Amino acid sequence: MILSNILRYSKNIGSKVNGHRLQSTLIVAEHDNEKLAAVTRNALTAAKKLGGEVSVLVAGTKIGSVVEEVTKVSGVTKVLKAEGEEFKGFLPEILAPLVLATQKRINATHVLAGSSAQSKSLLPRVAALLDVSPVTDVIDIKSPDTFVRTIYAGNAILTLKSLDAVKVLTVRSTSFEAAADGGSGSVEDAVPVGSYEKGSGSEWISQELTKNDRPDLASAKIVVSGGRGVKSAENFKMIYDLADKMGAGVGASRAAVDAGFVPNDMQIGQTGKIVAPVSDNNILIKV
């Protein structure tokens, strides 16, 4: 009886160890072909809570500097590089088959990205190809299959357990610290050329970037936000001046955006950008 119990206990320990080793996360890096986006560093911190190896897929046109930066981030096991003109503009129709092929190649149990406009277009497509349900805007990870996210516009918090074989997640950047440097990941090609089916029906033409010296809303420690009460686009200069004095980012309510006071990339809230919650180190000023 004693020997039987010892054997059963050893078997259970072995299955847990083996199960942990089988955990593998594929992170889809977001970047501008020059520098890694901050949301990906937040996603790397979230991935550490899942356990197992962490691989980062970097796709783009000229990604040498981004690949080098990712290899130095703490927690990265390897960087999977996909470089080519077809990735110009980071179209989700092109990237989704690549992510799927890469996930199958490394047998990843989790596909993860920071919550952003790009990931919200890409990861649902990946989830559809995998025939699983994506879990979006995760704010905490309890275990490899149990996640916490907000619902009802943030008025309630839901803890859910996913039974899908592959978990597809976007994580809210304000809920996880950015991963620091200190790693030494290896680099290899994501998939052989021509080994995945490219998307069709969409073509990247051009893009116009708004230059802004103020802190990015998603990572700013201080945000000054204007609403309908500002009354006009001209009056928003007061918001800009206050923000510049404080070294803050500038946001706006949906009403201010709809009224044409400011462009829609400044909108914060449920239908805009998520900013850091108010705490001792984070301040949101509404005007």
Image (spheres, helix red, strand yellow):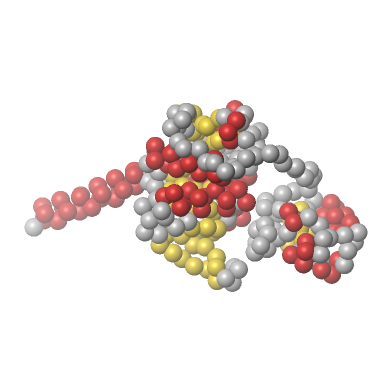
Which residue is found at the position 36% from the left and 59% from the top?
163
Whether residue 43 is visible here, answered yes or no, is no
Q: Would residue 69 appear left or right of 49 to someone viewing this image? A: right
Residue 30 higher or lower than 188, as above or below: below
- Residue 206, quarter of the rendered image: top right
- Of residues 276 and 272, the one nearer the viewer is 272
Left/right of residue 124 with respect to residue 256 in the rendered view:
left
x%, y% of residue 41? 58, 44
Residue depicted at x 20% and y 53%: 9
- Residue 256 location (% of width, % of height): 79, 64
Quadrant containing the N terminus is bottom left
User: Which part of the image, by quadrant, shows the C terminus?
Assistant: bottom right
Answer whether residue 19 is visible to the viewer in this image.
yes
* Figure label count: 0
Q: Residue furthest front?
A: 201
Residue at left offset 78%, top offset 43%: 211
**Measuring 57% from the left and 43% from the top, which residue is drawn there?**
201
Q: Quadrant of residue 278?
A: bottom right
Q: Seen from this angle, which residue lies furthest right? A: 234
Where residue 242 sits: x, y (%)?
Answer: 85, 57
